[in-house]
Structures are given as structure tokens and as C-alpha cells.
Image (tube, rainbow, N blue to C red):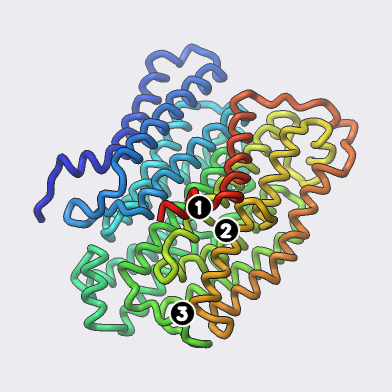
Amino acid sequence: MNTSYALLARALQPEIILADGAVLVIAYDLIFGRRRPLATRLNTSLLLGALTLVGALIASVLVGAIGGFYGDNFVIDSFALATRGGVIVLALLTLGVASGAKVMRNPAEYVALILFATTGFTLMAAANHLLIAFAALELASLSLYVLAGFDKDRRESAEAGLKYFLLGAMATAFLLFGFSLIYGLTGELALPRIAAVLALGGMSPLLALALVMVLVAFGFKAAAAPFHLWAPDAYEGAPTPSAALIASASKLAGFTLFARLLWPGLGELAGDPSQPFNPGGWITIVALLSGASLLLGNLAALAQTNLRRLLAYSAIAHAGVMLLGVVIAVPAGPGPLFYYLFTYGVATAGAFGVIAVLENNGGCQKITDLAGLSRRSPLLAGALTIFILSLAGIPPLAGFFGKFTIFAMTLRIGGIASPTGILTLLAIALSAVALYYYLIVLKQALVEPSTPARSTRIRVPVTAAITLLTAAALIVVLGLCPSLVLGLF
């Protein structure tokens, strides 16, 4: 394999900056910060982390879409470039969420783990090789497991980290077993060469088993039903910034990786999405996962009284729409899928940012804890309204256009009689259910009076306020001008 290590170093500048920044954060805190107050250490670590992310974002833009390199085992096309930038922006929002959350012990290690997770996310976006994809996925996953259980003062955090780790390890076993079968059957690890071999051989029983293994792992990473059991506990128990990162950047990087794996790598086994009732291939399995996620996520959310668990079941329902975006990722291009993933991530990170500030001002577990929020903090109430309405898909916010684009493309490609077409109609119908439980949240925040115990004004830290306003502005601007994102493709 002929390769230029200079080109490799240039192409991986964002990852190099992120890894070096993580080490710098820990080293600075170890040398200069151990005797300082926790709040000062947190602010310093957040500042260094934010500067690292900004540097990685600038490097990513300067590198640009350079195509394949290192023997085409990495590929930086428009999809990878957009995902790189997207996960870095979402990681920046996560650091902003952390600025408004409760100060935990070991803040430098916490920020460093966020940077390591982001490094894994950016590598996932560029991976074009099974082993590189697996290594990047595990770097991100192991960081997220620790982040979920990082708050050692809460049993819920330890439970979230343990459940996430155990189920994640099982999903990793499925993924690795599926990859080993694919390698054994094709003799290749690079996705383009796997596709070339599959074009000659077609489907076989062992290949079908490998496909099922990979999709099981995919279902876990996407929090798609019936592999969603970790999500409600992780969202509820993890520290708020950790939950924001899991719900936003992790989703964006994970769906990008698997869209690349399923289409350029296993696209010969996809089936025909325009074939009525029986497209065959992995599209049928993905359609089943999508339908289960749409039904379970929306219906289970109706019974939730805990705000974080409601967001978790909402994420499961949104995963059903994202799976439809994976199905059309090549026929319609990756633009609709990325737009939906990124805008969903911004809205979800923003919602967790509001929760973080509330938890630092008396707690926010139940939906009823939002009562009187519009009087206690108009800023938080206004930002939460934008985020929730975007998740519900209300125009002119970005969430509406994201759903509209995916639904329109799915119906155009598959038709109403196809499984994906039927699922699109189901998703449209269940949007009314979703609107109901989202409006319950807004009713508490905007209409219900505050209780005597929660009647004081809420002080929003400056950094957290800037983060929330930035996220809300992104939702509004991208909803009014979606071409700012879709034009990248």
C-alpha cells in the first residue's frame, strides 16, 4: 500500500489536535490546578477544551474534502467533512452545558474524556475500513461509558455507566463477530473492496448471519427498539453534559459510520427500496427496526413523568426517522440524513443545557419541576420552547424541515406501497402523539404556576446562557435557511 505519511498527518490534523488537547488539559490541571477550587479548575479545563475544539474545527475546514487517503482506508468526502464539523460543534455545546451543571470532582479528566470521545467521533466519520471503524467506535464508546458513570456521588450515575457498559460490550461482541464473518467470506477489510467481492458473490447464509450481527450492534448504538433498554437509564442517571453528548454527537457519528458501512460496504445486499412490500436485503431489517422504534418510542414517552426519560424515549422515536434516513442515504444523498442528525443533536443538547442549569438551581427530575419556568427565567423558558418545538417538528424550526426532507425523499424513492413508505406514513401519524407529550412539557414551563418551593429567580451562568442562545439561534436559522447545511452536499 503506497501512502504519504505527510498527507496522513495533514488529513488527521483535527484528531491530532483533539488528542493533544486532551493530554494538555490533564497535564495543566495536574501541574497547576490541584490546589485551586473546583470551580476554577472546571472553568480552566472548559476553556482549554473549548480552544482545542475550535482549533480542531478550523483544521477540519482547512483540510477540506480531500477524498480517500492512506490506501483509501480513510475517506474525507462532503459527508465526512460535515460530520467532523458537526460533532465538534456539538461537543462545544456539551462543554457549554457543563459550564451550567453541578461541579464534579476531577473536572480536567471529565473534559479530557469529552475530547477523546470527540476524537473517536471524527475518526468514525472518516473510517473506510472495518478495523479502523471498530477502533474509532471503541475509542468513542469507552469514553462515553466512563462519562456516563463519572458522577461518583450519585448511585444513579454508577448504574447508568454499568448498564451502558455491559450492554455496549455485548453489542461490541456482535459487531466484531459480524465483521469477522464478513472478512472470512470476502477476504477484505476495506469497504470498497468488500463491495466489489459482494457484487460477484451475492447473499449467502453466513453473510446473512453477519449482516444480522452488524445490524444488532447498529440497533444498540442507535438506541433503536428492541435494543434500546440502556437509553432511558443512561439518559436519567448520567451527568447532564454526558447525557447531552450521548444524545447528540454520538448519534451523529454513529449514523454516519453505519450509513457508510451499509451503503458503500454492504450496498450490494441492500435490496430495492422501490420494490413494493418486499425490498429484500438489509433494508427490510432496518425498516423493522424503524417501525419498532417509532411505535415504542412515541407510545412509551406518553407514560413518562421524568423529563430525562421522556427525552430518552423521544430519542428512540427519532431513531426510527433516522433509520429511514439511512435507507435513502445513497439514493437521495447524505444531506437529508446529516441535516436531521445535526439539528436533532443541537435541539437535544440545548434541552439538556436547560436541565443542567435547573439542576444547579434546586433540581429538575420530574416534568412538573418545570412549573413556573417562564416567570423564574424567561431565557430558559424561551430556549426550551424552541428546542422542544423543533423536536416536535413545528415549522419554521429546523426539526420540521429535517423531518419533511426525509419523509419526502422516502416517499419519492420507495413509494407509498413500500415498507419505507408505510413507515413514513406511520411516522407522520405518530408525530401527533409526539406533539402531545412535547406540549405537556411546554405547558408546565409556560402555563403552570410555580410552587412556593420553586419561586425564586434562576441565575443563568454567562457561558451557559451563550450556549443556549447559540443553540436556539442555530435551530431557527437552519430552519429558515436549510440550504446552509444541505448546500454542503
Q: Quadrant of residue 198?
A: bottom left
Q: Earlier in the sequence, mark 2 or mark 3?
A: 3
Give the label, 2 or 3, closer to the camera.
2
Q: Earlier in the sequence, mark 2 or mark 1?
A: 2
Q: Is residue 401 above or below residue 448?
A: below
Give the label, 1 or 3, closer to the camera.
1
Residue 369: image x %, image y %? Answer: 79, 41
Q: Quadrant of residue 72?
A: bottom left
Please state which amino acid type lies under the numbered disc 3: Pro
Q: Where does label 1 land, which residue?
A: 483
Please state which amino acid type lies under the numbered disc 2: Gly
Please state which amino acid type lies under the numbered disc 1: Ser
Q: Where does label 2 land, which residue?
A: 402
Q: Secondary structure at mark 3?
A: loop
Residue 172: image x %, image y %? Answer: 39, 59
Give the label, 2 or 1, closer to the camera.
1
Q: Earlier in the sequence, mark 1 or mark 3?
A: 3
Per the model, the C-alpha gap separating discs 1 and 3 is 26 Å
Q: Front-most of 111 and 174?
A: 111
Per the model, the C-alpha gap separating discs 2 and 1 is 12 Å
Residue 66: image x %, image y %? Answer: 26, 49
- Disc assigned to residue 273: 3
